[in-house]
Image (cartoon, helix red, strand yellow):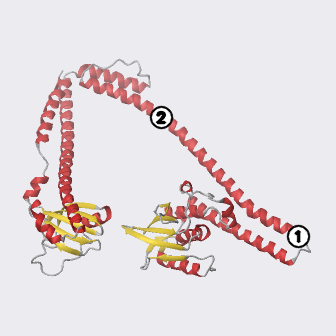
């Protein structure tokens, strides 16, 4: 009896400790959640003020006048008008300040607003007056309105979470402790049943006919353990099914590789058959007209170049698929790479060339593979020259976000039918098979582009431009 009572008390103390830990975690979570809600509520109010001020600016009302007429909406409100280059056009607290206002482009709420349209910072020390503020910024039409409230006792009270729910949780906890004490008094039968259950598990026998535990709290837990064990057995069965599915996926990969091999064989047959036909004709007609013979040899040479290009593209894709870890990286200047391609296009015959425009003027250096980076811009350029039917190519650095460059590569040609856009990065996919072969395409260029972009930590997608032509948007990691 003494041993049973001691065990009961130990179990009760363990239950109390567990419950206290659970309650503490819940209180901490709920407190942070409510505090976050109040922060967002305050931010919404300041964002509304920011949007109204931006609207007023569009109607020609200057920032100072608008602030003077609406400053009573919040106590101690501070408003700053900033352009997206960080220059401060207006600060409601600029009176009496010595020296110019520093550039605000590095302020975290300004950076967030320029990137996402709006952002806020709960508490940050002002680099101008040294006070802590709650900042809320909104960006629209290349202007950022940032409103701020001093982080004083008034604001601290506004953002503080209510404590009513704490007392509610504590009352519930006390009731749970009392219930737990009652539960521990019925351990006898439950422990016997649990011991029997454990012996069945140890022997590996079926538990389907195991009698249910007593209908009390601990009995419910014990029944839950039985349910968990049954679910574990079901999970093991599911694991076996997943293993079979993995085997199926592996066989599917083998099938895809086989299909790719068949495609490669088919693509190789075309230039090889053409070369063989031209050479057989020349060998079986020794007295062939010299001009015709030269024409056949030139066509054979053209098919040989296409064959070499195809093998090179296949080799590049294979290297990225199966040995990407072996591909080296080094510092690469993207601006020099783009200018090199521009100069090469200028040397093409007038009927074959296109004008290339770019906004890249500063050095753009990333860690990457020179050959693969060159293949991205070169394949996109060759694709535009061969198929776009346009006169201009536009290579634009759209933006620089953290460790990524985002580029746009566009032309003003005929574009691509929408039904093809989801497939143009597939290997050997051709929109116009007859035209592609006539122009010497391998059907792998855009697939190489996608894999090369992915190798450099980026993504790429294609879309038709509203003013005509095809546009590729892709990103490249600097590291």
Residue 479 visible somewhere in the drawing: no
Vertical position of residue 18 compared to residue 205: above or below: below
Disc sitting over residue 283 in the figure: 1
Name the outermost residue toward the front: 59
Disc sitting over residue 238 in the figure: 2
Q: Quadrant of the C terminus?
A: bottom left
Residue 101 position in % (x across, y down): 18, 77
Q: Residue at x 65, y 51 (%)?
A: 259
Q: Residue at x 64, y 80 (%)?
A: 349
Residue 454 position in % (x across, y down): 49, 61
Residue 40 position in % (x across, y down): 21, 53
In front of the other: label 2 or label 1?
1
The answer to whether 123 appears left or right of 479 in the picture is left
Where is residue 90, by image quadrant?
A: bottom left
Vertical position of residue 426 compared to residue 357: above or below: above
Q: Quadrant of the N terminus?
A: top left
- Front-lying residue, 136 or 179: 136
């Amino acid at each position: 009896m003494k041993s049973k009572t001691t065990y009961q008390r130990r179990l009760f103390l363990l239950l109390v400790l567990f419950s206290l830990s659970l309650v503490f975690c819940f209180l901490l979570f709920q407190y942070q959640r409510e505090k976050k809600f109040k922060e967002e509520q305050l931010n919404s109010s300041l964002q509304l003020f920011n949007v109204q001020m931006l609207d007023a600016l569009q109607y020609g009302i200057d920032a100072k006048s608008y602030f003077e007429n609406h400053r009573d909406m919040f106590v101690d409100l501070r408003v700053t008008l900033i352009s997206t280059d960080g220059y401060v056009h207006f600060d409601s607290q600029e009176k009496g300040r010595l020296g110019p206002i520093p550039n605000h482009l590095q302020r975290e709420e300004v950076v967030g607003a320029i990137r996402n349209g709006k952002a806020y910072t709960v508490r940050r020390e002002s680099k101008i007056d040294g006070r802590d503020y709650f900042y809320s910024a909104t960006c629209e039409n290349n202007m950022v309105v940032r409103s701020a409230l001093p982080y004083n006792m008034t604001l601290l009270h506004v953002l503080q979470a209510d404590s009513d729910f704490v007392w509610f949780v504590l009352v519930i906890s006390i009731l749970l402790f009392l219930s737990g004490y009652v539960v521990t008094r019925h351990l006898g039968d439950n422990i016997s049943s649990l011991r029997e259950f454990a012996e069945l598990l140890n022997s590996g026998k079926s538990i389907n006919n195991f009698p249910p535990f007593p209908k009390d709290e601990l009995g419910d837990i014990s029944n839950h353990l039985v349910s968990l064990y049954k679910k574990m057995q079901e999970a093991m069965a599911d694991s076996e099914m997943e293993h079979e599915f993995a085997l199926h996926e592996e066989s599917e990969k083998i099938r895809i590789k086989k299909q790719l091999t068949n495609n490669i064989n088919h693509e190789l047959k075309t230039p090889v058959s053409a070369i063989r036909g031209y050479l057989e004709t020349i060998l079986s007609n020794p007295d062939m007209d010299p001009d015709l013979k030269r024409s056949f040899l030139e066509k054979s040479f053209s098919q040989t170049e296409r064959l070499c290009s195809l093998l090179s593209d296949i080799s590049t894709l294979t290297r990225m698929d199966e040995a990407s870890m072996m591909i080296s990286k080094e510092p690469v200047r993207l601006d020099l790479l783009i200018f090199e391609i521009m100069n090469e296009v200028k040397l093409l015959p007038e009927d074959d060339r296109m004008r290339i425009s770019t906004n890249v003027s500063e050095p753009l250096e990333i860690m990457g593979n020179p050959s693969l980076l060159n293949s991205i811009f070169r394949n996109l350029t060759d694709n535009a020259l061969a198929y776009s039917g346009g006169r201009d190519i536009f290579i634009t650095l759209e933006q620089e976000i953290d460790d990524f460059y985002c580029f746009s590569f566009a032309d003003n040609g005929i574009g691509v039918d929408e039904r093809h856009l989801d497939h143009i990065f597939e290997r050997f996919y051709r929109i116009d098979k007859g035209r592609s072969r006539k122009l010497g395409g391998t059907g792998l260029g855009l697939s190489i582009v996608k894999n090369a972009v992915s190798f450099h930590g980026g993504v790429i997608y294609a879309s038709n431009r509203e003013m005509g032509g095809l546009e590729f948007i892709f990103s490249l990691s600097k590291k």
